[in-house]
Structure formats: C-alpha cells, structure tokens
Image (cartoon, helix red, strand yellow):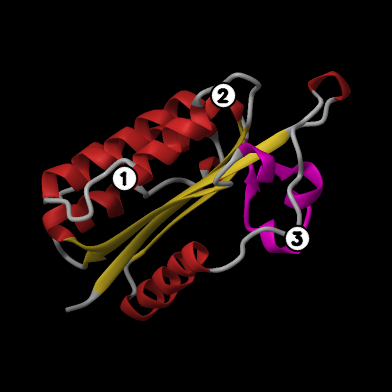
Amino acid sequence: MEHSIFAMEVCARLVPESPLRAALAEVIQGVPERMNLHQKWQQHQRAAALLLDALPTATRGCWDYFDDDGRALGDYDMWTKGMVTEEGVRPEPSGLPDPYRGDARYLTFTLAMLIVQGSPTDRMMKELCNIPEASLWQRATFARILRGLAQVSFASVKSDVLYLIPRDDGWALTAQDLAATKFEYLRTLEG
C-alpha cells in the first residue's frame, strides 16, 4: 500500500478572553481513548470549524499535500514527532501577555493525515489542494481546504495526528519565539 500525506498548521494570535486555545485543547483531550471512524471525522470537523473561525487572527501557517509514498511516510513521521518532542524555543514559560504594550502571544494547531493513495479521499484531497502558487498562503486558501476536510472518509486514512502548542496560556509562543529558525516553515498569511 502506498500513501499520500496532508498536513496543515495554523498559527493564530491568542486574543485576551478568547476561548480558542481551550476549545482546541478540548478537541484533542475530550475524546474517547478509542474512536470509530465517525467520531474521528467529528473530531477533525470540530478542529476545522474552530480554525475557520480563528482565521482572522491567524498570522502564519503552512499546509502540504504529497502523493509520493516515500515523502508521505517521511513527512508524516516528521509531523508526528511534534507531539513527542519539545517544540518550544525556551525553557521557561512566556508568561501572560501585556496587551497594552503590544505583547502578543500565539498558538499553533497542527493536523496531519496519512492517506491511502488512490482512495476516494486521496483523489479529493489532491483536487482540493490543487492551488495556484500565487494563492498558496492566502487565508481564503486555508478556508477552502478546512471546509473541504468535511469530505474526508477516515476509512481511507491510515493514521492521523492533531496537536496544539501551548498546552496552557503561560507557555504561549511569543513573536520572538516565532522568529526562531525552527518556525521558519510557517508562512505569513495574506488576505
């Protein structure tokens, strides 16, 4: 069996009093240990809906779709390592922001799927992700893809991962964190 990969990461500004981080955490933590295909679909739909609502506060992001088996397996491994490695750039919490001084904080939310190549879901994702290069990093493109995830059949998804940085507000990412080399893959969103 050969594989394709779809992955997306959205970096959004944490707005004071916004329930976004807690709601995204609930998407990950508030599920049964074992899920059936419909529950998995519901989990991803909830995450996609939250990310769609947060797109106005999203500052950066990235997404990939590849239908090359070797690259799909390697990239999926890379994305899943984000769950088990230290992803921050500093050893202590960033603390709560001071909104009166423009001291912004950010979160990132990642979803990745290892898809059975040639399946209906794979064909749909290939078409959905066929985006002109000039439009790759536009919010409208992220919205299109997030809406399209409603068509994913988890019967065609071999493995998936969702994760959120930070777990709590005190470890939120700063602008200085996002300037670090480890986050250079995140593109500035347009529109």
Q: Which mark is residue 156?
A: none
| Residue sitting nearer the eye, 188 or 16 | 16
Among the two numbered marks 1 and 3 on one chain, the one whose residue lies closer to the N terminus: 3
Residue that numbered label 2 is attached to: 56
Q: Position of residue 152 (x, y in %)?
A: 20, 46
Q: Which mark is residue 128?
A: 1
Closer to viewer: mark 1 or mark 2:
2
What residue is shown at x 78% (from left), y 42% (from top)? 175
| Residue sitting nearer the eye, 34 or 44 | 34
Q: Position of residue 60 (x, y in %)?
A: 62, 42
Looking at the rendered structure, the secondary structure element under dot 2 is helix
User: 177 left or right of 188?
Assistant: right
User: 150 left or right of 146?
Assistant: left
C-alpha distance separating marks 1 and 3 = 39 Å
User: Please, what is the three-letter code of the amino acid marked with disc 1?
Assistant: Leu
Looking at the rendered structure, the secondary structure element under dot 1 is helix
Residue that numbered label 3 is attached to: 91
| Residue sitting nearer the eye, 182 or 22 | 22
Within-10-Å neighbours for mark 3: few <14, some 14–19, many 20+: few
Please state the extent of the stretch shown in magenta in the rendering: 169-189
The answer to whether the residues at label 1 and label 2 have Cβ atoms under 8 Å apart is: no
Furthest residue toward right: 101
Q: Position of residue 134 (x, y in %)?
A: 56, 43
What residue is shown at x 73% (from left), y 48% (from top)? 93
Looking at the rendered structure, the secondary structure element under dot 3 is loop
Among the two numbered marks 3 and 2 on one chain, the one whose residue lies closer to the N terminus: 2
Among the two numbered marks 1 and 2 on one chain, the one whose residue lies closer to the N terminus: 2
Query: Quadrant where the N terminus lies?
Result: bottom left
For the question of whether residue 17 can be seen, the reply is yes
User: 134 left or right of 36?
Assistant: right
